[in-house]
Image (cartoon, rainbow, N blue to C red):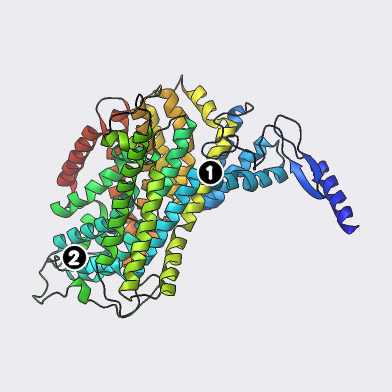
């Protein structure tokens, strides 16, 4: 009797709450086999039967009702919340919730339920999304295992023998960052902690080292096809491609967009220009920040990397005391990941091309193979192979027990858990935006008044501002990219190069905040790894970031968007302009 009374009360509460859809009949509470179920409105498919309506790789791409300017509410709420709260996850969640409020006639109870039981769940239920998440988690675990084995520290030890002056010390740091390209956190922490003492002995100020490892760590991870950033970027771009109805491979699209990421590429060029020219800009040009002891170290034989033994352990991913540092423990796992990724894409693509009917089968070439391959599947194979290889290495060398190895793998997985949640929420926000028709509204409203050349510039500017204000590149990508696809597709009349430019502008511009925002996690990690003062680091890196950003707009986004020349010419002209600026005004 108590259960019947509770069910009746709940039915009355649900009915009074008015669980209704946006345009159709209200949701009806019914009892099925003595179990209360809420039937959703007819225009919103139930989670178990939804195929396209709530498939979170862009949603339906069209709204069932016209919400007009109100369709802008989710991205605006997410943007304002990210700036005000400095919490990207909360900001994206509020953006999804605000969209659900519109879709469900302002009912907060139903909006809360749909935020989690439909949009958030379906963001992970999609097979392509699940593959991206699995790849990201497996790669994060592999990175943790490599760190625990001391592979990254071994690479640093290997390069110390080449450090004979301040310039060679900084060059060695750049080389080590290039080897630890797979993750920005790993690059900053490994290079900063392992090289700090050596470069300081050669008179390099910690502010100079912090700028270098921060720039290289973020930029290389953001443009590398195999990194902790790659999975999230592939997921974002896959959603854009599906929204505009393209079947292009998201992995290859991400790679093709690199040449349009002007800010990170110019930032990557600016640091070596100043290192090898011996001139700096901003506060680093002052005498107190100049290298004070460009001398050779004592002529004592340097031990090989495998002879170095770790004395103490700090965090959970630091090598155990007594661990011998061997570069092979980093080179082999990540070499395996790179080889299996591209090898897997070739095998998968070749099999699909050969399985096609002879009349429709293209010539068996590298281009046709890669264009028909499933990159996400290959990335899953590669990350799993890298994990197993790294696990085998530490077990065969008896560096870790199986339990210790799995514990390190779990710690590495934790490092990518937050970005994965951000990715899921960004997919959910993209689906809400698609169901509200936000992008369609913007494309219709702006198509007549927005010049074609200006969209890449506006996208890049918005990405710069959001990432700096929120301190999160991933959050900026998740807010901007869902709007980019339909706008670029409409303004560019289906031009693939134009769409690539807009995607590159969003992905490249979003790295600005991770490079110089004082609340960015990589900014904090760079300070911790180099023992540099936070204010000093922000003050010294900001002029570099501003110069690279100005160059990106003047020589990249605006002229390339206007069709004056291609991205390669823009990169060459911009790099030359920066070199001339450093030569003329640097000290």
- In the depicted view, which residue is nearer to us: 387 or 271? 387
Q: Which residue is mark 2?
A: 159
* Image quarter in which the N terminus is found: bottom right
Near mark 1 (Cα within 10 A), the count class, few <14, some 14-19 or many ≥20, is: some
Q: Image point 40% across, 24% down: which residue? A: 494
Q: Is residue 9 left or right of residue 437?
A: right
Residue 405 shows in this picture: yes
Q: Which residue is mark 1?
A: 126
- In the depicted view, which residue is nearer to us: 511 or 309? 309
Where in the figure is residue 216, as x and y percent of width and height?
28, 54
CB contact under 8 Å: marks 1 and 2: no
Q: Image point 41% across, 35% down: which residue? A: 459
Where in the figure is residue 299, as x and y percent of width and height?
8, 75
Residue at the left extreme of this rendering: 299
Residue 211 shows in this picture: no
Q: Is residue 514 left or right of residue 53?
A: left
Q: Image point 36% across, 72% down: which residue? A: 318
Is disc 1 placed on a helix, strand or loop? loop
Q: Label 1 vs label 2: CA separation? A: 44 Å
Position above or below: 370 against 89: above
């Amino acid at each position: 009797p108590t259960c019947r009374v509770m069910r009746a009360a709940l039915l009355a509460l649900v009915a009074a709450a008015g669980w209704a859809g946006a345009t159709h009949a209200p949701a009806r509470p019914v009892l099925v086999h003595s179990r209360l179920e809420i039937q959703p409105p007819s225009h919103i498919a139930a989670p178990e039967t939804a195929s396209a309506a709530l498939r979170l790789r862009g949603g339906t791409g069209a709204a069932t009702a016209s919400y007009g300017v109100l369709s802008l509410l989710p991205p605006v709420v997410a943007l304002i919340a990210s700036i005000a709260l400095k919490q990207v996850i909360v900001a994206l969640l509020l953006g999804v919730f605000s969209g659900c409020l519109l879709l469900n006639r302002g009912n907060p109870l139903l909006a809360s339920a749909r935020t989690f039981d439909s949009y958030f769940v379906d963001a992970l239920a999609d097979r392509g999304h699940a593959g991206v998440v699995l790849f990201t988690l497996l790669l994060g675990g592999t990175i943790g295992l490599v760190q625990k084995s001391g592979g990254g520290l071994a690479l640093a030890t290997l390069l110390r023998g080449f450090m004979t002056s301040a310039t060679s010390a900084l060059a060695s740091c750049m080389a080590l960052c290039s080897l630890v390209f797979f993750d920005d956190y790993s690059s900053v922490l490994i290079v900063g902690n392992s090289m700090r003492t050596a470069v300081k002995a050669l008179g390099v100020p910690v502010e100079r080292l912090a700028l270098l490892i921060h720039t290289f760590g973020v930029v290389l991870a953001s443009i590398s096809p195999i990194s902790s950033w790659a999975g999230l970027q592939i997921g974002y771009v896959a959603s854009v491609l599906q929204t505009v109805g393209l079947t292009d491979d998201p992995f290859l699209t991400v790679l093709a967009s690199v040449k349009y990421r002007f800010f990170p590429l110019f930032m990557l060029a600016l640091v070596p220009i100043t290192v090898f020219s011996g001139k700096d800009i901003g506060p680093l040009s002052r005498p107190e920040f100049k290298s004070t002891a460009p001398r050779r170290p004592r002529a004592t034989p340097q031990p090989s990397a495998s002879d170095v033994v770790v004395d103490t352990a700090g965090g959970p991913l630091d090598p155990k005391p007594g661990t011998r540092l061997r570069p092979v423990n980093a080179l082999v796992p990540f070499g395996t990941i790179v080889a299996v990724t591209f090898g897997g894409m070739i095998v998968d693509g070749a099999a699909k091309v050969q399985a096609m009917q002879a009349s429709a089968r293209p010539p068996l070439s590298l281009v046709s193979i890669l264009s028909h391959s499933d990159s996400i599947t290959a990335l899953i194979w590669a990350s799993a192979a890298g994990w197993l290889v790294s696990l085998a290495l530490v077990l065969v060398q008896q560096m870790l027990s199986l339990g210790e190895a799995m514990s390190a793998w779990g710690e590495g997985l934790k490092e990518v858990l937050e970005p994965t949640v951000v990715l899921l929420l960004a997919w959910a926000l993209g689906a809400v935006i698609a169901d509200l028709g936000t992008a369609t509204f913007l494309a219709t409203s702006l198509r007549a008044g927005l010049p074609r050349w200006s969209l890449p510039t506006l996208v890049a500017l918005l990405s710069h501002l959001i990432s700096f204000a929120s301190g999160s590149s991933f959050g900026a990508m998740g807010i901007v990219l869902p709007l980019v696809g339909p706008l670029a597709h409409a303004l560019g009349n289906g031009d693939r190069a134009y769409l690539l430019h807009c995607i590159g502008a969003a992905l490249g511009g979003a790295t600005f905040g991770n490079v110089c925002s004082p609340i960015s996690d990589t900014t904090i990690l760079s300070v911790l790894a180099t023992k540099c003062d936070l204010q000093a680091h922000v003050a010294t890196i900001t002029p570099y970031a501003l110069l690279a950003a100005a160059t990106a707009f003047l020589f990249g986004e605006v002229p390339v968007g206007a069709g004056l020349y291609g991205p390669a010419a823009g990169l060459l002209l911009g790099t030359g302009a920066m070199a001339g600026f450093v030569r003329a005004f640097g000290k």
